[in-house]
Image (cartoon, grey):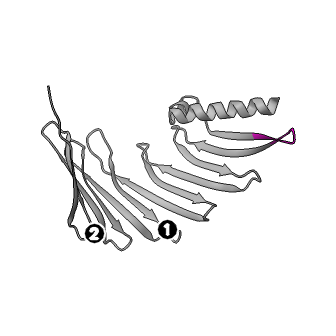
Amino acid sequence: MKKITLVILCILVGLTGFAVAGKQQKKNKVKSITVLHTVYENGKPVSYKESVETFDRNGNSTSETEYAKDGTITKKQTAVYDNNQNVTEETSYNAKNNKTTRKTYKYTVMKDKTPLAEEVEYNESGAVVKKTSYTYTASGKKASETVTDGSGSLVSKSLFLYNAKNQKTHKQNFNRSNALESVKEWQYEYY
């Protein structure tokens, strides 16, 4: 009965913690959450550790590991944060395809905001696979998004246009050849 209560308590703590993403972990000084799973085989309870998530003192999730019933790791994710609580690096491992990916993030400093400036994805050997760069308007709205491959060649580019009320009006998408591929338009009606 104690194991069942513990499993239910861990699951409830895990679900409520994920719903408010870090605020509860920081407030309650949560260092980690372990989820235990109990299954009944032939009427007998068999328990195993299903996952462990760790947090820093700011309530940021620094690692999340999922386990198979035999205790082997099936997935693992880690994250590193800067002083402004922005994710600067993420690493993911998936045992199903035995693949590890790593992404880094850089931010631009704007008044009262730190929007994402660059996202870089690396393969297992550390070579750049994809790089996405962002620019912003003076008011902090996304102005462009440019994706290049590992060699720096253009994959796609999007430009964003805004009206005088700072509302998005157009998104122009360009292909590898920098040729206009599509345009999405937002039209507003006002009272």
Q: Is residue 103 magenta?
A: no
Residue 29: tell me if it is visible.
Answer: no
**Quarter of the rendering occupied by the N terminus:** top right
The secondary structure making up most of the magenta span is: strand
Question: What amino acid does circle 2 point to?
Answer: Arg
Q: Secondary structure at mark 2?
A: loop
Q: Secondary structure at mark 1?
A: loop
Residue 20 screen position, x and y as percent: 50, 32
Q: Is residue 44 magenta?
A: yes
In the image: residue 49, left or right of residue 90: right
Residue at which label 1 appears: 123
- The image shows residue 171, relative to residue 37, as above or below, that is below
Mark 2 Cα shell of 10 Å, populated few (<14), some (14-19), many (≥20): some
- The image shows residue 89, relative to residue 38, as above or below, that is below
Cβ–Cβ below 8 Å for labels 1 and 2? no
Residue 75 screen position, x and y as percent: 62, 54
- The image shows residue 93, relative to residue 21, as above or below, that is below
Residue at position x 80%, y 33% from top?
3
Of pointers 1 and 2, the one earlier in the residue sequence? 1
Residue 125 screen position, x and y as percent: 52, 72
In the image: residue 80, left or right of residue 105: right
Residue 83 found in image quarter: top left
Residue at position x 71%, y 31% from top?
8
Per the rendered image, the range of residues in magenta is 38-46
